[in-house]
Amino acid sequence: MLEMKNICVYYNEHVVYNHAYFCAQDHELTVVIGKSGSGKSTLHELLTFQRTGTYEYYYNNENITDLNMNQQQEFILTHMGIVDQIPAFINDLKIKDHIGLCQSLSHGYDIDEIAEQLEIKHTYSLYPQQLSGGEKIRVSILLALIHQPEILVFDEPTASLDKHHTQLIVELLKDYAHQGHTVIIFTHDALIKKEADIVYQIENQKLTQYVINSPQIIEKKGISSIASPKHYTQYLYKMFEHRKLLKIIMVCLTSLSIGLCSFSVLYGQSVIQKYIDQLALLDKGGVFYREYIQLTPIPPSIGEEIKSVKKLSHVKTWPFILDEYLTEHLDENLDDLNLKLYQDGQIEDRREMTLGTFGWATYNENFQYKMDYVEKTIDNEEGIYISLPLLYYLKTGNLFEDRTLIGEETLKNICQEVNENTEIEFPVTIPVYRTIENEMEEIHYQTIILKMKIKGIVDSTYPLKMAPINNMNVDLFCPLGVIEKYQTTLMHSIPEDAQPYYPNYYQFVVEDGYDFNEAKEDIEAQGFKVSSDYYDIYTKVDVVKQLNESIFMISGLIMFVVLMLFFGVKYNQRQDDVDFIHFFTRCGFTVSFAKKILGIYFLYESFICMVLSIVFMFVIAYVFFALMYNEVFIIRPSFFVFCIVLSLCIEVGIPMIVLGRVKR
């Protein structure tokens, strides 16, 4: 039994109810009638906790007046079924899924017989938008009866029905009331008034009771309980099937824009940072030389021209004596030109010189190189740096071809065998003087045999890109001071018509605080060509920065357009989301619970967006890697985090913002 006492409701100065009384008994079909504006909707909203007012509310003699909002929703869930004149549906779910969802949310019953009685089984495969007004009312009655509530409250249930379907509903509700339930109908329908047991007429701010028919008590029908085999969240995934094409297009556009943003913000910056890290490992310098053509074997010597470069205060220079191969310019009259490896003063290995294989150059022992390519350093004050390929040849007699085939463990053992007592004896050709005949310069060399300790092992052959004709691979670095000392000694015995030797190459470094590109331009302004690994990477950084800025602008524009489009779509769908929440609150769930369920659906869409955005990002990155720079392909956890966070913000955050505050 529902009972409301001392009902007082005012609209500004207009009195709707003044100490009115209402009571609905079990086993009775109670009908409330009245003129438009008399207060039918107000009483309906008071009974279903949709409006506040001054009254006392009792259920089975228990005072439920002061229930808070959550307790009111719990009461509806446990005891009530509500059917409004305009029912709320989830537009993205078929009717059969509405039934399954309601059965999964509460202790549902098998309502196939009721569906046949209401003649709505044909609607199971349809969406709510495909139903007529009368079909919607009949379906909402079916959904209200799924958990067989003790109280049913209807607002104009037959307003859009023909006489035949009105009669069906009246018979159904009357039987349901006489089985021991409380059924309350607010209506204008004369047929329902005629079939009612109790009628309340709203007049003079009161509720006047009329007994129309004597209530009949009939046996309660046995209806078997049934539980949906699916959890309610599984029905949320079905919501994606409705308007699938639109949703797929929006998710794909959003994912593409997120992927582009992730690429430009994270991947592009990661590539730039990787190149910057490589720059940090390199000396801020290179080698310069005078320009020469492909037919000329070596560039012209640098004589007095070096003075112009030395005037550049921010550039430090020194000779970089370089010979293409150890076998180049050797004096063939010498008896022993083999490479020898000594350990503790004893010859360990002897190898023949291999033509055109190993190159050598000098290093400045007075300059602190960064030596990022050195695999092992040895505590010797003076010595040579040897490449791992040359050391491998000395140890095994085999040429270094494929590192993976040799094995890292083998190479590691070879390096460990080298210590401060390991020495190498090798012949080198030292440039001593030059002669000029018919305007052709010729450099004269003297072969000497050097025996030096190893100071470090270079992990691979050191490449020097000497444009335009030769890429020099250096396997042996000798101290510059040692070579200059021999040059000074040998200069005493040069011919009278000879001229001093001038180096072909000079090494340079740029002081900290000065831009490398400007220093390079200053050197080139003196008529020299510059070769620099530092500049190669420096240029890549600059190019990638420019590309990244362009991609960032494009992706930002695309993101802005997609966000505006996405916001517009979600705003147009806002009423669907509001109806979603109202559907659950009519079932007795709280607004927060309904929003939580809706949020799960948004999470489902965002998960699809996350996966696609990550895929798009790596596709874009791969295209960039394959077509632009095939040197750096980076995968970092931050890429995934960025896509996940942005997907959540867009697919969950924006819809929740658009939805705003929804009241019960």
Image (spheres, helix red, strand yellow):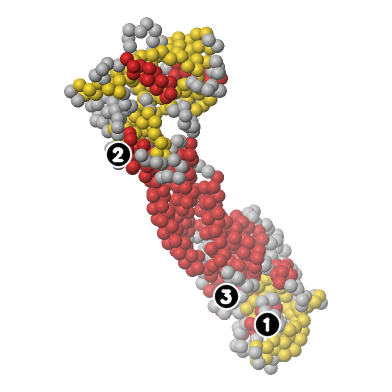
Q: Is residue 650 left or right of residue 507?
A: right
Q: Quadrant of the N terminus?
A: bottom right
Which quadrant would residue 472 be assigned to in this image?
Answer: top left
Category of crowding for the residue at label 1, using alpha-carbon neighbours closer than 10 angstroms: few (below 14), some (14–19), many (at least 20)? many
For badge 1, the amino acid type reads Leu
- Any mark on residue 280, and which? none
Q: Is residue 257 left or right of residue 496?
A: right
Residue closest to the far right: 61
Q: Residue at x 66, y 92 (%)?
A: 13
Find the distance from the CA under tag 1 to the CA under tag 2: 97 Å
SS for dot 3: loop
Q: Residue at x 49, y 32 (%)?
A: 368
Precedes in sequence: disc 1 or disc 3: 1
Precedes in sequence: disc 3 or disc 2: 3
Q: Is residue 626 above or below residue 31?
A: above
Q: Quadrant of the C terminus?
A: bottom right
Precedes in sequence: disc 1 or disc 2: 1
Residue assigned mark 2: 526
Category of crowding for the residue at label 3, using alpha-carbon neighbours closer than 10 angstroms: few (below 14), some (14–19), many (at least 20)? few
Picture coordinates of residue 627 (x, y %)? 37, 42
Find the distance from the CA under tag 3 to the CA under tag 2: 87 Å
- Any mark on residue 43, and which? 1
Picture coordinates of residue 349 (x, y %)? 48, 10
Residue assigned mark 3: 86
For badge 2, the amino acid type reads Gln
Picture coordinates of residue 445 (x, y %)? 32, 17
For badge 3, the amino acid type reads Ile
